[in-house]
Image: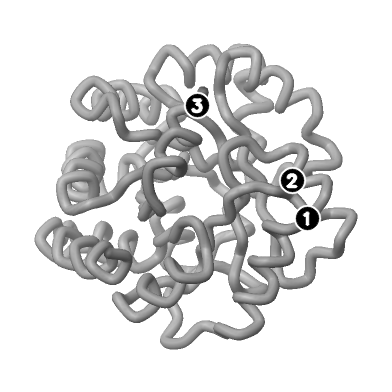
Amino acid sequence: MHLIEETFKKKKPLICYFMAGYPSMEKSYETAKALIDSGADILEVGVPFSDPVADGPTIQVAHEKAVKDGITPVNVFELTKKIKSEYPEIPLILMTYYNPIFIIGEQKFCQLAKENGADGFIVPDLPPEEAEEFKKTANSFGLATVFLLAPTSHQERITLVGRMSDGFIYYVSLTGITGARETLPWEELEKKVSQIKQITGKKVAVGFGVSKKEHTQKLSKISDGVIVGSAIVKLQGKGDIEGIRKLVKQLKEGME
């Protein structure tokens, strides 16, 4: 069984995204440690890319800086290996655009990911309709593929994503690009999450816009896990490790 699945069986995980190599390799390693030590149950590791279309301004800046500094997937794999050797029980999900996978080759990319401690992938610009081959390759290495659903997703897409997603489904709570928000559309969220769970029988984690304890408090009641990204990356860019610890502790408190 995937480490990701096991984690969801045990608890409602707090899933934290950070950008590899931002603002430096060393600082991103410190960020990962701070996230885990403060209560993150699963890490999403951002793979820097030159055209991050699905990301909001905060994460775009992180991509740009890391790309400019020459951070490659190989550096990201070095980082995941280091994290996994220290925290073997924490699932690491690579969040990467498809282009780096395409350049290295699906087979090779999955092999390197597996050898270096990754547990799965989220590829935001790879639609599930076109992902059969990649899923097969990833699964053959024991790696999970996680797909996204949005408020606009219709029943056919929900069914398809239910079939293609391993471990959990990533539900994007707002349409548009990522970023921390003040409030989230609770009622609509609750309806959609229960609809997805009903159709797919899968665990559903909610992300996009999560930035404070009130969010995780409410979200953990209506979903199976909570995903935080931009709020962490904003602090990561400043090298504010203490701020990251504080934020994650608060978010985690909201879920307990």
Tell me whether circle 1 and circle 2 mark residues in contact (CB < 8 Å).
yes
Please give the residue where the numbered disc 1 appears in the rendered image: 199
- Residue 104: horizontal and vertical position, in percent? 60, 20
- Residue 192: horizontal and vertical position, in percent? 69, 71
Disc 1 secondary structure class: helix
Is label 3 or label 1 in front? 1
Please give the residue where the numbered disc 2 appears in the rendered image: 162
Q: Using the numbered discs, state the Cα–Cα distance from disc 3 to disc 1 in whole angstroms.
A: 22 Å
Q: Which mark is residue 2?
A: 3
Quick one: label 1 or label 2, which is nearer the N terminus?
2
Q: How is the image coloured?
A: one colour
- Residue 123: horizontal and vertical position, in percent? 62, 42
Q: Nearer the viewer, residue 213 or 124?
A: 213
Which amino acid type is marked by label 2? Gly
On screen, residue 52 above or below 30? below
Label 3: how many Cα within 10 Å (few below 14, some 14–19, many 20+): some
Quarter residue 139 falls in: top right
Which amino acid type is marked by label 3? His
Q: Which mark is residue 6?
A: none
Quick one: label 3 or label 1, which is nearer the N terminus?
3
On screen, residue 192 above or below 170? below
| Residue ID at (21%, 69%) | 250
